[in-house]
Image: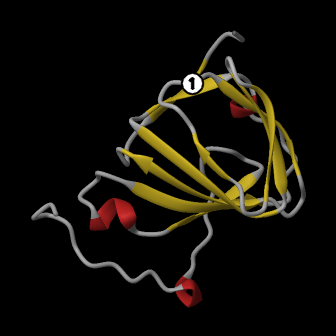
């Protein structure tokens, strides 16, 4: 264990939902970035009701070493370079490979997902379709 890591108990009763990368979603930071000295981040992402289009539904990549998704509610369809279209549903897990080109096609109105990423600070870049 890293010397700079701290114990964390993030209470759901204290949840704060904020804007984030995608305008159609809202984000709940689970405090892992601070607790792991930036080695990881974890957030719950859910549909916000905003239908304003944004750039990240285009093909993009995340410059990170690890990205884990667990669908908590609803469903979404993603397309991954070399893997095709995948519909992810409640209870499904995705180990999204580092640097894989992907895009969200659509999602249900109740879509909610737990995302864990390393490192906590990473870039998202819009790219050409594969």
Look at the picture and state if 20 lies above or below 65.
below
Left or right position of 71 against 29: right
Classify mark 1: residues with Cα within 10 Å, few (<14), some (14-19) or many (20+): some
Residue nearer the viewer, 62 or 2: 2
Q: Which residue is mark 1?
A: 100
Residue farthest bottom in this picture: 13
Look at the picture and state if 14 lies above or below 109.
below
- Colour mapping used in the image: secondary structure
Quadrant where the image shows the C terminus: top right
Residue nearer the viewer, 10 or 54: 10
Look at the picture and state if 112 lies above or below 123.
below
Q: Residue at x 68, y 17 (%)?
A: 82
Q: Position of residue 42 (x, y in %)?
A: 47, 60
Q: Residue at x 72, y 11 (%)?
A: 129
Residue farthest left in this picture: 3
Q: Position of residue 20 (x, y in %)?
A: 60, 51
Residue nearer the viewer, 99 or 10: 99
Q: Secondary structure at mark 1?
A: loop
């Amino acid at each position: 264990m890293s010397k700079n890591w701290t114990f964390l108990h993030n209470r759901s009763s204290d949840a704060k939902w904020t804007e984030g990368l995608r305008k159609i979603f809202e984000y709940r930071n689970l405090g892992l970035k601070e607790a792991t000295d930036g080695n990881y981040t974890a957030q719950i992402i859910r549909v916000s009701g905003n239908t304003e289009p944004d750039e990240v539904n285009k093909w993009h990549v995340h410059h990170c070493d690890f990205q884990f998704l667990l669908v908590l509610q609803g469903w979404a369809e993603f397309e991954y370079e070399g893997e095709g279209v995948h519909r992810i549903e409640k209870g499904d897990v995705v180990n999204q490979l580092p640097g894989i080109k992907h895009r969200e096609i659509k999602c249900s109105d109740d879509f909610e997902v737990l995302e864990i990423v390393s490192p906590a600070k990473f870039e998202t870049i819009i790219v050409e379709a594969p």
